[in-house]
Amino acid sequence: MITSREAVEELLDRIETADVHTNAVCTLHPDALGQAEALDAESAAGRTRSPLHGRAILVKDNVDTHDLPTTAGSLALADVPPPARDAALVQRLRAAGMVVLGKTNLSEWANIRDGNSASGWSAYGGLTRNPYGLNRSAGGSSSGSGAALAAGLAPFAIGTETDGSISCPAAFNGCVGFKPTVGLVPTAGVVPISSSQDSPGPMAMTVRDAAALLSVLADDGVDYAAHAVPGRLAGKRIGVPRATYWGYSPHADAAAERAVALLAAEGATIVDHTDLPEIGEQAWADELTVLLAELRHGLAGYLAGRPGDVPRTLEEVVQYNRDHADLELAHFGQSLFEQALEGPTVDDDAYREARDRCVALTRTDGIDKILHEHGLDALVTPSYAPAAPIDLVNPEAHPGSCTSATAMAGYPLLTVPTELAAGLPVAVSFWGASGSERTLVEIAHGYELARDRSTGPLPEPTFPTFV
């Protein structure tokens, strides 16, 4: 049996040889081998902290680590002392005996800085590339976490999602991404965007591994991996909301149709055309109002606790970027930051009314209503179109996605790769009600087993320069 030290040595070698292509890891832990040796000694003494004891994990660089920089991709947080303490979720990783291998690059400030940002780029970490096509986006904002998993740089990673930031890089890079119900995994020590939508979660290469990591992150006494067993698809009722969530990508649609057929063949009951209310212009505006108000409030609270000479408010971050525009604003601006400074605060009626409309549309009149009316266990949709080419000049083009309804509702979303389309990964996402993580694991694992029997897991990436 391989020791933790041996596994970490192999991963460090892999990072040295493969991450020159992807640029997924922005900071390596200088004592990763020491961590592994200490955990091996515990194992030899008969102490195993958890099923993930001795396993290595990469942590997104907006999650506090007391012994490594936490920058959110910004130079404003780069050359200062690390946070005084680990984020609550990192404390749980260490308590479970996991080796913190390092930090992964992200879309700067988790992609909330500007409406025309480039996913996978940060001033601190540079540009992360997709291992299935180095000219293709690694998605965002958990870009490095997704690319690192696909490239074999670690078996586990942490992502964070506000609206798509786990699901998108999971889909683009062909790995599993699990955005839990908001509140299941603590956000203390995570650089915030939105108190009502932020949700850290596990990323891995299989549903079972993602579920095992969720058990550590949630620390609620539930063994989520115990639900990743065969035979749980039979009798499940799964809805297919075609309006809005299908039809924007022939590649994604074709793969999702095959996934639905596999679900049905395994005994699930497919309920078609279980459509949700359209997320129109008012809803998009409401979500942005909520996010920007909560960002302004939450970021000031977070920055107040950081040691060293750092900005303390969003206003000071905006000024820092202006003062360092040659580096920070080289590829895109900070229009959303500036809009947040001019918009409603969390104490304003406009904010509360916008949040109430988001909840009513996506929960009361949306996911909850559809699940109840049709007696459904979950919904399934395509996740995203295949990854678009990287473009640091023009705005990114994403024809559609699956994430906004669950994001506004604060509900879980489990994304699983299906196949390669034109050489690039595509995926399906399973939606559920609040607290339905165990059911989603059962469904997603059942699909994964059926996929592997049918076509096998996705081929490993070959790092082509052009797709």
Image (tube, rainbow, N blue to C red):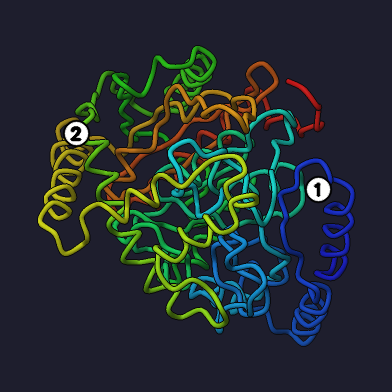
Q: How many marks?
A: 2
Q: Residue at x 33, y 26 (%)?
A: 269
Q: Residue 31: x percent and y percent?
A: 80, 76
Question: In the image, is 337 to the left or to the right of 373?
Answer: right
Q: Up-down: is 42 above or below 109?
A: below
Secondary structure found at label 2 = helix
**Quarter in which the C terminus is drawn:** top right
Question: In the image, is 196 to the left or to the right of 331?
Answer: left
Work out whether residue 435 can be spotted.
Answer: no
Q: Up-down: is 351 above or below 170?
A: below
The answer to which of 267 and 220 lies nearer the viewer is 220
Secondary structure found at label 1 = helix
Amino acid type, residue under disc 1 in the picture: Asp
Q: Which mark is residue 282?
A: 2
Residue 185 figure quarter? bottom left
Residue named by callout 1? 19
Q: Up-down: is 421 above or below 202?
A: above
